[in-house]
Image (spheres, rainbow, N blue to C red):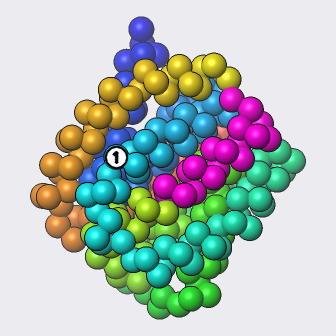
Amino acid sequence: MDAIVLFSIIIVAASILQTSTGFGFSIMATPFLLLLFEPKEAIQINLILSLVISVALIRKVHQDVDVTILKRFITGSFSGLVLGIVIFLYVNTAQLKLVVSLVILLLTFLLILSFRVKQTKERDFFVGGISGALTTSIGMPGPPLLLYFSGTGASKEKIRATTLAFYLFIYSASLAVQIVFVGATQTVWVSSALALPLVIIGLVVGQKLFMWVSQRLFRLFTYILLLFTGFYLLLERLISNG
């Protein structure tokens, strides 16, 4: 019963966050889902539910999508998807999480100190590649996009719409790669199906919240999520070492 309650809270909270900001489901859900499921199952449940949210929302936000950047993200992600599954299958993901956590924390602190980066074609491709690699390896495509968009000072509408559109591709591709190379258990499909009503609740509440979130508060949410992700991955690595 405790596991069911925890699962319900995780899915609703993460769905609200994803709907109201365009990111955050993976960042919030994955660490806690790992408490309830095997790593492979947690990542795949995250991929399925994140894809559902993106499909449900894209019609409402498609007019705010930056199509040029989106195409570059997708193109760049192809190589990242392949690299990510290789990392997932053969590389020590604990070491990867340590590196990712330190990079996220460093760049987030730079953003808080008003560090800014100029958006370029080459950087668009690079960010898409990193996001693709992190999706198939640890199920977290969001941090590179958040860091990049925050550094360029993009509007909350553009961030939400473009990331959701990118997630439609990256989650679909990552899920397909995971199923082909790793397979999916019955637990993944049953748990995902049971979570759908909870996702719907999150979609409704999140849509309401988005209308009330200012650009300044949106940026604050971004920093908090990035810091949480960085510290979580770092702490997880330190505990596993201990």
Q: Position of residue 194 (x, y in %)?
A: 43, 21
The picture quadrant where one finds residue 75 is: bottom right
Residue that carries the numbered disc 1 in the rendered image? 56
Vertical position of residue 223 compared to residue 123: above or below: above
Crowding near the residue tagged with mark 1, few <14, some 14–19, many ≥20 C-alpha atoms within 10 Å: some
Tell me which secondary structure the magenta stretch mostly adopts: helix
Q: Position of residue 165 (x, y in %)?
A: 43, 62
Q: Amino acid at mark 1?
A: Ala
Q: Is residue 195 visible?
A: yes
Near-viewer residue (200 or 212): 200
**Residue at screen point 22% across, 71% down:** 215
Q: Tell whether position 54 is magenta.
A: no
The picture quadrant where one finds residue 47 is: top right
Q: Position of residue 240 (x, y in %)?
A: 71, 38
Near-viewer residue (84 or 173): 173
Magenta residue span = 167-184
Near-viewer residue (175 or 96): 175
Near-viewer residue (216 or 135): 135
Q: Identify the element where label 1 is drawn.
A: helix
**Residue at screen point 41% across, 59% down:** 164
Q: Tell whether position 181 is magenta.
A: yes
Vertical position of residue 125 compared to residue 18: above or below: below
**Residue at screen point 41% across, 26% down:** 195
Residue farthest left in this picture = 212
Classify the position of the N terminus by image quarter. top left
**Total marks drawn?**
1
**Residue at screen point 40% across, 51% down:** 54
